[in-house]
Image (tube, rainbow, N blue to C red):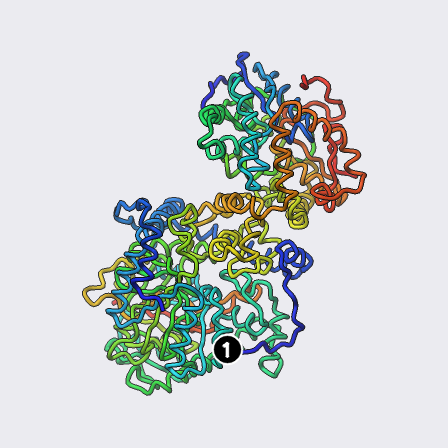
Amino acid sequence: MTPTVDSPPVSVPVHFIDRADRALHDEQLRAAVRHATDLLMKGRQVALGGLEDSDVVRDEARRIRSRVLSRLPDILDRWATNLEARGGHVHWATDADEAVEIILDIARRRGARLLVKGKSMASEEIHLNSALEARGHEVVETDLGEFIIQLAGETPSHLIAPAIHKDRYDVEKLFTADAGHHVGPDITEEAGYARRRLRSSFLEADIGISGVNCAVAETGTIGLVENEGNGRLCTSVPPVHIAIMGMERIVETWEDLDVILSLLARSATGQPLSVYTNLITGPKRPGELDGPEELHVVVLDNGRSAALGTEYAEILNCIRCGACLNVCPVYRQVGGHAYDSVYGGPIGAVLTPLLNPASPGGRELPEASSLCGACAEVCPVRIPLDDMLLRLRHRDARADSSRMRRLGFSAWSWLWATRPGYALSTAAARRSRGLASRLPSRGWLGAWREFREIPPMGRRDRRSRP
Amino acid sequence: MSGPRTGGGDSSPVTVFSTCTVDTVGPDVATCTLNLLRRLGFDARLVRGATCCGQPAWNSGFGTEARRVARRTVKALTRTEGPIIVPSGSCATMIVHHWAELFSGDRLARSAAAVADRTEELSQFLDRRGLADSLPERTGDTASTTVHDSCHGLRGLGIKGESRRLLAAIGTPVTECGTAERCCGFGGTFSVKMPAVSAAMADEKLDDMVASGVSRVVGGDLSCLMQLEGRARRRGLDLEFRHLAEVLDGADPDQAATEGDRR
Amino acid sequence: MTTREQFLGRLRSATGERAPADTTGEPVPPVRYAVDRSGLTGFTESWTALGGTVETVTDLEAAAAAVEAWTAGKGPLMVVNHPDLAGVPRDIDWPDCDLDVAPDAGCGVVRADAAVAQTGSVVVSSTTNHGRSVSLLPLNCVFVFRRDEIVDDPGDILRADFGPDGPPSQLVLIGGPSRSGDIEMSLTTGVHGPGVVHAVVVTG
């Protein structure tokens, strides 16, 4: 589907700092992000209070996920064998191109015209929609938020709230253009339009595509949680269901699944469970009237295995709840698009350099953090995200820093490795404060003074009045 | 964490590591820390020859440079006595939590570990030893006060109630702001690499402080206070920013800092 | 294309050198909740908090009457062919119908397998209900189940022994009406699945 609203192509700045700057001037975006993340964080806190001791459950979840990582090949093997025994087809994709090829093959074989999709970050990773559209297949996003951004020709800006940056008036314009008659801005009316509009797509679709939240090895099951019912429709109504699964999204047993599910929706949206917890084990069975005839699961590596066995392996424990985005003070100011990556916020700032080290985001996103540590504090599986951001800075600092920066740190270190160098430079800094706040300046001093004064030293005048 | 739980000073030796931020932008904080500890009966001395914990370079990914500087500080602190008190949650976190990795394989590794074992952040030190009750109550200090929880102190060292208990002990009630635990946007070099985002982060806290009707912001890290104060001044906001050591020491703000033994 | 052996082989070489972390294989303790919820009272509290409604009846005959009353005026009625629902009058009998008529139903009636007190969920599986559409396509949906089928926690469903055949092709825990907060975080119901859900609990 092509965007139905004609908007002039907006070029995306190459650097985070420029994209962030643009976001900082978008008051609607910032208000929307603040509102959404505040609500989600408040909900999370209440929902975690529903557990007797959420810290204990989080420790258990971390253990479960780490155990999976340490035995991932065996667990995937067992899962695939079990799913195939239930009639499912498992495909193995090393990279995005392979995953796309696998899905195109199925679509071609089935003569598919229309595909409906539930929310899937893995499908965003492989840029599935554009590939399918290029081959003449029509793809319709069915999650309300994803449908909105598909109409707008944009990409998701949040893991679980993809259209966080759109308000009812944006939706009014998009839906009115799509419908050919006026829709909105009443939110109930807009949601009602989406239900009617997308219902026919579900019924006509040749293939339904979904992601996978958590597979279970012991029975060959895939789990998919969602609130709208579009995921259940995608996986129940069309004759073929294709699920795209990041290779690490798996646990060994249903006991493990119980623990993960007790944290996932609580951390993500503040619900005890999502409205629909769909646990799928194979296609429909003999005697069942509905359900897909074919079930395909595409297991996606796409750079993940490079993190296995390294100090970053634990990032693969992520269950994609989005809590780290919601709590991040940087994400809060600039929103998801500033990261210009499938994954934004702290998880994106760690994942992007690992999955896509050569991309501009892979180089600079670890800098998009004040290392405040709020992300690690809320992570349900306790991934030390701030430590990883720091390690990534160490990994890339020398190669990526400007000559000036390298020389600056070097000179600083030699100066402050000596007592006189330190004494002289701190004394000079104290004495030149008045000068520094008056003279035109560049570099870091200029960057400071662009937005801030240099406060006075000492306690003589500690009021902020200029 | 080692260190005798003396309850009062008993003239036992303690060492104050002033930190580079204090030496560069707010030397009064070191003076106040020393005064405070001496008034509580400690034989408090400023470490001589220490420079910086290495964090600015470490957090930018420059380990070699960070180690080069921190080695000087390890050597200086190794020669001192008693608990090492740092008027900064951030520098204390660097020493306590990150020096092990920074000095991994270095011949100063054991010294660094010994220094880390002796290191405590100021409010942590006072609170752990139950010294709040030994602080003189101040009457007439009516400034409406809030606390900014610096990230590293809060999440690295678990400091939260310490500053509040100490402020309560001197008769200063704290007005809590909803954004107390949110990062001020300083983040070391982050503040100059991404100045606009950094300032936006400060703005949200400042707006909250103004809306909460407070007139004074107290924190345990001068770097955060510098960030918030620098931004508040640019915006012309009527807020006062004080390090916890300054408030606890209680010296008259108008009195020039002359009593301390600066190096 | 990559084969399973190639794919897993690469993972083995990536993880192989590393000692498995924390693979003690200790049993995973059940998830414990702050408040114990059980039985009809617990389910009612949780389910209504999610926006569902509940009524209790003493026997299957009364259940049929309750379903008929609740569904009146809500459009064509699609009912799962289950002995417990034999008394419910219907427009579409599932699965003894043409698949094409399913989307026209205004109201679905399902014999749920179980319900969960802690989370306010009803449990529906493709095995016993022989279908997914009834609890999915209509705007309104009634779930009928017996009081003694209410379990305490999700773990009582998830940790159950599925037997040699394993779990059904689709097992779903449904917690209230379909909902979305995708526009301005404002809650809207019925955006895709049923927007109005009712539970009829047979106590006798």
Q: Nearer the viewer, residue A262 or A457?
A: A457
Which residue extends farthest left? C164
Q: Amino acid at mark 1?
A: Glu
Residue at the spot x=55%, y=24% of the render? B85
List x then y, in percent, for residue C201. 31, 68
Q: Position of residue C42 (x, y in %)?
A: 35, 58
Please say whether residue A269 is visible from this viewpoint. Answer: yes
The image shows residue C165, relative to residue B146, as above or below, that is below
Q: Nearer the viewer, residue C144 or A198?
A: A198
SS under mark 1:
helix
x and y percentages locating residue C202 in the rendered image:
28, 69
Percent from the top left, x then y, of residue B64?
54, 35
| For residue B238, side relative to residue B136 (left or right) | right
Q: Is residue B30 above or below residue B221?
A: above
Q: Is residue B120 left or right of residue B212?
A: left
Is residue B173 or residue A332 the one in the foreground? A332
When the figure is inspected, residue B232 is found, relative to residue C3, above or below; the finding is above
User: Residue C120 sits in which quadrant?
Assistant: bottom left
Q: Is residue B40 left or right of residue A241?
A: right
